[in-house]
């Protein structure tokens, strides 16, 4: 008899659909029964087609329902868990974790795994108090990088360190490769010339991504790198501020803000180099997409980024436009052979450390899960 698993998340956002699928792949889709549930949002046909599991439950709770004590979501999840009798529950982010910890007080579940995708999730005293009150030995907290794990261990000192682990974000290499546009097609859609040298960046336009210093660094190299252009794909609250900076620096034709582009990672092969200048980054999944596309990387030495990049890319200090500019110029002046070699290094690192088979090994070696897996065999 197979296992019954619940994967519970906050929303149907694209990045979380990918994560739900990552965790679904841990199990035997033919034998185990996997349910994906989301607190918010409505299930649409495109979303259902992207999910690997057949059993899906979107609660479509309003924002008010998932604030405060969250009584209604707790009751609904308790009813679901009592009906289905799940063996393993995996929650992503804090609100699903909070709700499921309450549910677990009234419903027997063999193993609960709470995955945190951001830093400082448990810094609030009220959250730490609730976790201390609701924690049980069959619960594991996981960070998507060692940086997040360490942050959790510092906040949740009352939980044994062996129950606060790292479960890296992973990438389905074969699936991702099939979704990339070719270099020629991606450049055509972005109105880029073949002779342009493109520094690419994909992220929300928010302070922790630090696009401001990326634009400043680019301005330092533009005169000595005449074929260079900078493409920033994404939208956010800093859009007008960044547009003003681009205009002030006289870079209107060299720096392009595309706004939000659905499936932006598909354009990755249009770039000659991918740059992530974040000042705070729990993991940086977009780096894996660049690595699978075999694009050379420049990123900052902050939180989870060095764990992802390793020695397969250029690492510079955050908030250092001068050093970022030096790395960008170095990449620009490199030989095509060197750029190909750096791209291959990134691809091999993603394959060796962040592929689905590697994640399966990482997950099932957890002692709590080893016993469950043995019992079901």
Image (spheres, grey):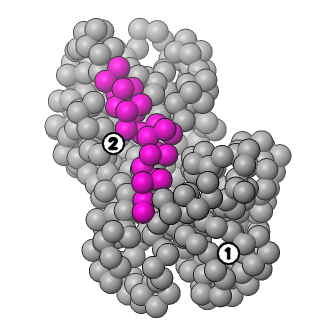
Which structural element holds mark 2? Answer: helix
- Please state the horizontal and vertical placement of residue 102, each as a whole percent of the image: 60, 85
Let me know if residue 177 appears in the view.
yes
Q: Would you place residue 261 above or below residue 157 in this image?
A: above
Which one is nearer the viewer's eye here, 290 or 102? 102
- Please state the horizontal and vertical placement of residue 295, each as a whole percent of the image: 39, 24
- In the displayed structure image, the side of residue 323 where residue 148 appears, left or right: right
- Please state the horizontal and vertical placement of residue 71, each as a whole percent of the image: 69, 87
- Please state the horizontal and vertical placement of residue 252, each as a whole percent of the image: 42, 30
Residue 63 — which label? 1
Tell me the crowding category of disc 2: few under 14, some 14 to 19, or many 20 or more residues within 10 angstroms, Cα based.
Answer: many
Sequence order check: which comes first, mark 2 or mark 1? Answer: 1
- In the displayed structure image, the side of residue 282 where residue 23 appears, left or right: right
Magenta residues?
343-367
What residue is disc 2 on? 308
Contact between labelled residues 1 and 2, with CB atoms less than 8 Å apart = no
């Amino acid at each position: 008899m197979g296992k019954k698993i619940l994967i519970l998340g906050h929303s149907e956002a694209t990045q979380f659909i990918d994560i739900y699928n990552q965790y679904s792949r841990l199990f035997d889709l033919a034998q185990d029964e996997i349910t994906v549930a989301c607190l918010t949002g409505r299930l649409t046909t495109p979303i259902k087609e992207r999910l690997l599991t057949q059993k899906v439950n979107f609660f479509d709770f309003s924002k008010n329902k998932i604030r405060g004590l969250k009584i209604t979501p707790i009751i609904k999840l308790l009813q679901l868990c009592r009906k289905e009798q799940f063996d393993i529950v995996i929650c992503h982010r804090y609100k699903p974790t909070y709700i499921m910890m309450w549910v677990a007080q009234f419903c027997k579940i063999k193993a609960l795994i709470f995955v945190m995708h951001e830093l400082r999730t448990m810094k609030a005293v009220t959250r730490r108090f609730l976790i201390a009150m609701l924690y049980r030995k069959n619960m594991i907290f996981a960070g998507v990088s060692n940086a997040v794990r360490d942050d959790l261990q510092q906040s949740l000192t009352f939980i044994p360190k062996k129950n606060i682990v790292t479960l890296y974000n992973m990438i389905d290499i074969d699936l991702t490769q099939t979704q990339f546009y070719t270099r020629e097609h991606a450049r055509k859609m972005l109105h880029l010339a073949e002779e342009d040298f493109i520094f690419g960046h994909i992220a929300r336009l928010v302070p922790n991504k630090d696009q401001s210093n990326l634009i400043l660094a680019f301005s330092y190299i533009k005169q000595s790198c005449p074929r260079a252009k900078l493409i920033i794909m994404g939208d956010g609250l800093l859009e007008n501020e960044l547009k003003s900076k681009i205009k002030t620096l006289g870079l209107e034709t060299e720096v392009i803000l595309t706004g939000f582009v659905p499936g932006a990672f598909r354009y990755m092969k249009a770039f000659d180099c991918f740059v992530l200048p974040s000042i705070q980054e729990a993991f940086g999944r977009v780096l894996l997409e660049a690595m699978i596309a075999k694009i050379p990387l420049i990123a900052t030495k902050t939180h989870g980024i060095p764990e992802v990049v390793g020695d397969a890319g250029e690492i510079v200090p955050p908030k250092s436009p001068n050093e970022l500019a030096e790395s960008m110029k170095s990449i620009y002046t490199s030989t095509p052979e060197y750029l190909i070699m750096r791209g291959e290094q990134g691809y091999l690192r993603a394959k060796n450390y962040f592929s689905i088979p590697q994640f399966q090994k990482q997950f099932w070696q957890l002692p709590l899960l080893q016993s469950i897996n043995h019992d079901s065999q």
